[in-house]
Image (tube, grey):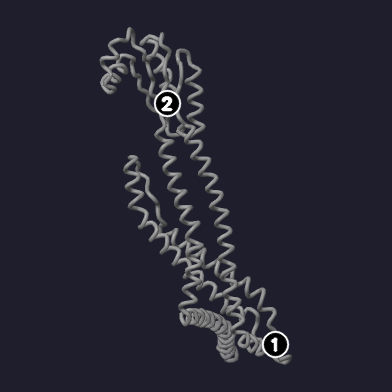
Amino acid sequence: MATDSRRKPESARGAKTSRAPWRQQVESYLNHHRKVARDSADRLWRTPVASLMTWTVMGVALALPVALLLLLTSLEGVSSGWENSARLTAYLQMDVPLENAKALAEEVDADGRVAEIELVERDDALAEFRASSGLEDALDYLEENPLPHTLLITPEESARSEAGVEGLVSFIQAMDGVERVQVDLGWLKRLNTMTDLLARAVWALSVLLAAAVVLVIGNTVRLAIENRRDEILVAKLVGGTDAFVRRPFLYTGAWFGLGGGVVAWLLLQLSLWWLSGPIERLAGLYRSDFSLSGLSIDGAFALIIVAMLLGWLGAWVAVKRHLDDIEPGEIAGG
């Protein structure tokens, strides 16, 4: 029993000592990351002009596609609103009596794609035209009313798309007594086509500018590698691994990305503030509620994270390409 009581504390101490190196390794690893991240940030702050120039280049390259995407989002919202306000006008044949027009309106109203329908009688239409046109004297010379009965049809929300409206037009046009159905969706088709084309162009531009950001960061990190060549050689001589040597430059790329993302967000906010006044006045002249939408909080965080990833990627490309060329044998050869 005494032997067992002595073994238990020894086994407990052995377990504790076996866990201690693992904890020490984790703490050492995290401390080294914090030290490297802080040292990389200090190096950027010691060269503010060069860092600011890199941040500005990244900010402009990131802000341009994001601004175009925000503009596309605003345009899609406007076109969606115009789609939802689309209304069909069905002109009946001149010889259709009022009773048949009412029956036709009830038949159209029974369709599930119709939200609301209004029958405008020909006499009411002529009276309204007489009051609004100022041509009372000229209209008195007409022998008969030239206006037909008219149906004003508002589609259901589910049918307010381009395809839904076209299907409803075909259905109404095929009914007896309907002379013509008028709905102007040609401009909406052109707008949607232009929006799709612009969206593809924006995504292509985004890819090109992202590649440009990676190249800019890669070139900046390459210069940093050349400036610290001796330091890298010494680190490799004392047994530093590639990951150990690579880590400061990856953090440098991430800090460049963070600064570029913040600059891009500031540029977007300043542009939105500068353009919002004229756009609101122009929309007011056209009686539209169009307005530019800015980045949300989630969008701003996403922009900064993407910028940091691009900075990290640019640094990784530069390190992967140029770090292998620096070997400790250069000292002996020198």
Q: Work out whether mark 2 precedes mark 1 in sequence or the reverse, and give the earlier one.
A: 2
Disc 1 residue type (three-letter): Pro
Residue 88, which numbered label?
2
Q: Residues within 10 Å of mark 1 (few under 14, many from 20)?
A: some
Query: What percent of the width, then of the height, locates residue 77?
Result: 43, 44
Tell which of 85 and 136 is nearer to you: 136
Disc 2 residue type (three-letter): Leu
Query: What percent of the width, then of the height, locates residue 210?
Result: 56, 62
Tell which of 139 and 91 is nearer to you: 139
Quarter occupied by residue 228: bottom right
Tell which of 124 and 119 is nearer to you: 124
Quarter occupied by residue 148: top left
Q: Is residue 235 left or right of residue 71?
A: right
Residue 328, which numbered label?
1
Query: What percent of the width, then of the height, locates residue 72?
Result: 47, 48
Residue appearing at x 50%, y 28% in the figure:
166
Query: What percent of the width, then of the height, locates residue 159?
Result: 46, 32
Residue appearing at x 42%, y 26% in the figure:
88
Q: Secondary structure at mark 2?
A: strand
Is residue 254 placed above or below 298 in the rendered structure?
A: below
Quarter occupied by residue 313: bottom right
- Quadrant in the picture for the N terminus: bottom right
Residue 59, which numbered label?
none
Q: Is residue 266 left or right of residue 194?
A: left
Q: Secondary structure at mark 1?
A: loop
Is residue 33 placed above or below 283 in the rendered structure?
A: below
Is residue 33 placed above or below 143 in the rendered structure?
A: below
- Quadrant in the picture for the C terminus: bottom right
Q: Is residue 11 left or right of residue 152?
A: right
Q: Residues within 10 Å of mark 2 (few under 14, many from 20)?
A: some
Is residue 223 placed above or below 238 in the rendered structure?
A: above
Q: CA distance from mark 2 to mark 1?
A: 79 Å
